[in-house]
Image (spheres, rainbow, N blue to C red):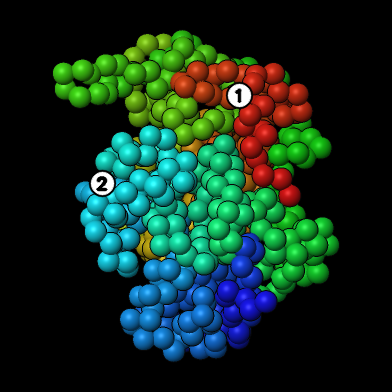
Amino acid sequence: MTPVLSVRDLRIRFGSQEAVKGVSFELAEGEALGVVGESGSGKSSLALALLGLHTDAEVTGEIRAAGTDVLAASPEELRRLRGGGVAMVFQDPLSSLDPFLRVGDQIAEVYRAHTGASRKEAAAKAVQVLDRVGIPDAARRARAHPHEFSGGMRQRALIAMALALEPRVLVADEPTTALDVTVQARLLDLLDDLRADTGMALLLVSHDFGVVARTADRVLVMRDGEAVEQGPVAQVLRDPRADYTRELLAAVPRVDAPSGRTREITGEPLLTVTGLRRDFVSGPPLRRRAVAAVDDVAFQVRRGETLGIVGESGSGKSTLARLIVRLLEPTAGTVEVAGDGRRRDVQMVFQDPGASLNPRRTVGDAIAEPLRVHGEPEPEKTARELMARVGLDPGRYGAYPHEFSGGQRQRVGIARALALRPRLLVCDEPVTALDVSTQAQVLGLLAELQEEFDLTLVFISHDLAVVRQVSDRVAVMRDGRIVELADAGELYGSPAHPYTKELLAAVPRL
């Protein structure tokens, strides 16, 4: 059978840097290939090349996709290829959807551009494909704007846009990275169903081995632009040949690990949360109502303990984090830190270090700033020492955030949070967007710093495997409330609440 996608000796060069180095593979109709590797391994460069989307790179080798020689194709041939031959779904649907246009109109516009259909036909097609990907009440939701969709629904809308042209190959670049486990599971089920129903082939780019194990038939492992290993997914996961593959698999946190973190915590409570509630006003001007994002939450965290908090988007996790560090004031209830309760005693590590760092300020100044604000002596000297402690070169004090990788920027965020020697560190999704090896390094660093600085941690994440790895106890949030709180081993081994069971069942396993 002729493969629907064939890549031979693909090389991609940006100036003097070779991003992809002689990669070859084939993809048959209805087959799913997972491409995994760390950030900078060349995964996304490879994916973009399949649709001829590199305009600033030298691309050589051979790519035959849906009968088209991509590297020799004319602009018109590439336009046709991107219509019915190969479609792509990107990681961040918000950056791919126009915030000013209704979702249905955007799908209809793409369909009309490639097929010449009438407005009425295109509108009907948009509703049809939205319904196909599981958007409820598709005719009504087609008239909504992207901000009115949840993250999972926006990702489904992008898949619907791709499906409107009935592609033979779907390239999905990290489509589930920021999604909750239950939303992720539904999206992966959808991709499976689409392959079975339409014969569409899938190339799934991901740094998550669990997602690849759940969906792909074969796997291609990339490192520094090279294919270090490829084969049937079960074979590669059970008996990897390459040392690098073994290293990646060893770094993957496991929700089904024999035991989580087991320590006896005997300290006095450092953080006490009582009857905590935070309301936000929502709705149109004449029908505004108060909605409780956090509702009657109570717990304690002992000194030296790590409390993990898990739950889906909208469960109240991040609002709770901001209440603890006093970035938000509660509608009711209290947050008390033992001792004099100074604000400097409680610091936060944010999910996106790129967004929380000023791009016009050097990383050294970002770390030194809180020291200067509080009148600490020798702020620059202390900032350099903190950079060294979190594994950054102090000589890069004068470098800017964009000059660092994602993992390095997260280390900057941790160093800044530690500058005032806090007693409590609140980490809100600190490793969500990192590949597994970088994630393991950051988690290892946090564990070391917790011992060295006598830190108490509140660790918030939708990744249940990561939370199991780092936590002594775990709280599960849903609709603003804590529905279950127990020792990590007990909660993962024998969950009591149906919602906790649902979350754990949705986690992809190797």
Find residue 469 and name its label. Answer: none
| Residue found at x 27% / y 41% | 143
Which residue is label 1 attached to? 499
Residue type, numbered disc 1: Tyr
Q: Are marks 1 and 2 in contact (CB under 8 Å)?
A: no
Q: How many marks?
A: 2
Badge 1 density bin: few <14, some 14–19, many ≥20, Cα 10 Å? some
- Taking 437 as reference, is 172 left or right? left
- Taking 507 as reference, is 111 left or right? left
Q: Is residue 211 visible?
A: yes
Q: Is residue 482 above or below residue 275?
A: below
Which residue is label 2 attached to? 102
What is the C-alpha distance between the residues marked 1 and 2?
33 Å
Kindly give the residue lying farthest to the left in the view shown.
Answer: 286
Foreground pick, 200 / 100:
200
| Residue found at x 43% / y 20% | 294
> Which of the marked residues, 1 or 2, is nearer the chain's N terminus?
2
Foreground pick, 396 / 162:
162
Residue type, numbered disc 2: Arg
Query: Between tags 1 and 2, which lies in front?
Result: 2
Instruction: Return the x and y of residue 64 as percentages of the image width and height.
Output: 53, 81
Q: Is residue 147 visible?
A: no
Instruction: Return the x and y of residue 217 as percentages of the image width and height.
Output: 70, 61
The N terminus lies in quadrant = bottom right
| Residue found at x 75% / y 64% | 232
Kindly indicate the quadrant of the structure image that contains residue 145.
top left
Q: Secondary structure at mark 2?
A: loop
